[in-house]
Amino acid sequence: MANLLSLCMIVKNEEARLTACLASVQGVADEIVVVDTGSTDATPLIAACHGARVVPFDFSRTDFAAARNAGLAMARGEWILVLDADEMLLPASAPRIHELVTGNENAGYYFARHNSLASGEAITDYAVRLFPHRPDYRFRGRVHETVDDSILAGGGRLKTTDIRIDHNFSPDPAARALKNRRYIRILEEELADDPSDISRLGFLAAEYHQLGLLAEASAITEKIVEAAPHDPQAHLNAGIYRQSGARTNCFSAGARTQTRLFGSRLLPPHTGRRTAG
């Protein structure tokens, strides 16, 4: 019998985008679990019409990992697929997902996420979006939540794939800036609780960069190098800032253009432990 695959999502007021997302996984997922964090529109109804089990979740305290883990707890499949409502799985990826699930290896798989920006540009980042359904494989992080570390701690591996998802990343600049500042506050709260959490530092640097606060972002990348001196990704991130003059706030227009998208590409140091898929 084939291993069952559960699509797990968290949503809020996504009526305009949810249908396209769910249509992209039709025939791929055996069940859909949608955790709703307080929608006031037709999002829960749309999810239910696509056969999803809709799970209400109290999001009065921002904690995306807790919301995602609530969905995992409700899932019945042997494997978990994670998508956001503003993402779509490319049709060509379906056979590869079936192959990986059937192989049943203890591994988390990175998908390539193609981010389309309002400017017409596009960048690609990577995230673990497919992994075995095990009780110890859970997300962590109130924002920028990841499951990577729990997979590694459970003896699993992290592997890259050619599976692609499209992400329509075109937020209102003012709304995005507010979100950046909100995430900075939450990340700083998490670091106050655990100053040794390097992954939180990486995401904090990215938030500062996206706000154009490059000196602050640079200073954080230097902290990451101090904490992880043997991590090549940490040295690469810090080196780009050093060469561009970020630490002295002397960014030229050319340097700003050269590193404009770098903040979206900052990755926590543990991503250096990927293995080829």
Image: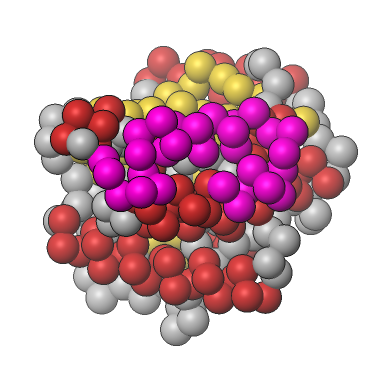
| Residue closer to the observer: 240 or 199 | 240
Q: In which quarter of the image is residue 259?
A: top left
**Residue 238 among those drawn in magenta:** yes
Q: How many marks?
A: 0
Relative image position of residue 16 (x, y in whole percent): 19, 53
Residue 223 lies left or right of residue 13; in this view the side is right
Residue 72 lies left or right of residue 251; in this view the side is right
Relative image position of residue 274 (x, y in whole percent): 68, 27
Furthest-right residue in this view: 155
| Residue closer to the observer: 198 or 93 | 198
What residue is rendered at 72% in x and 39% in y? 229
Q: Is residue 33 placed above or below 257 in the rendered structure?
A: below
What residue is rendered at 20% in x and 64% in y? 175
Residue 166 lies left or right of residue 200; in this view the side is left
Relative image position of residue 224 (x, y in whole percent): 62, 48
User: For the N terminus, which image quadrant?
Assistant: top right
Relative image position of residue 52 (x, y in whole percent): 45, 55
User: For the C terminus, which image quadrant?
Assistant: top right
Type of secondary structure dominating the magenta stretch: helix
Q: In which quarter of the image is residue 225?
A: top right
Furthest-bottom residue in this view: 60
Task: For residue 155, say whether it is visible.
Answer: yes
Q: In which quarter of the image is residue 182?
A: bottom left
Q: Is residue 251 placed above or below 139 in the rendered structure?
A: above
Colouring of the image = secondary structure
Q: Is residue 38 placed above or below 46 in the rendered structure?
A: below
| Residue closer to the observer: 113 or 217 | 217
Residue 153 lies left or right of residue 85; in this view the side is right
What residue is rendered at 35% in x and 34% in y? 244
What residue is rendered at 36% in x and 49% in y? 248
For the magenta stretch, what is the residue range? 222-251
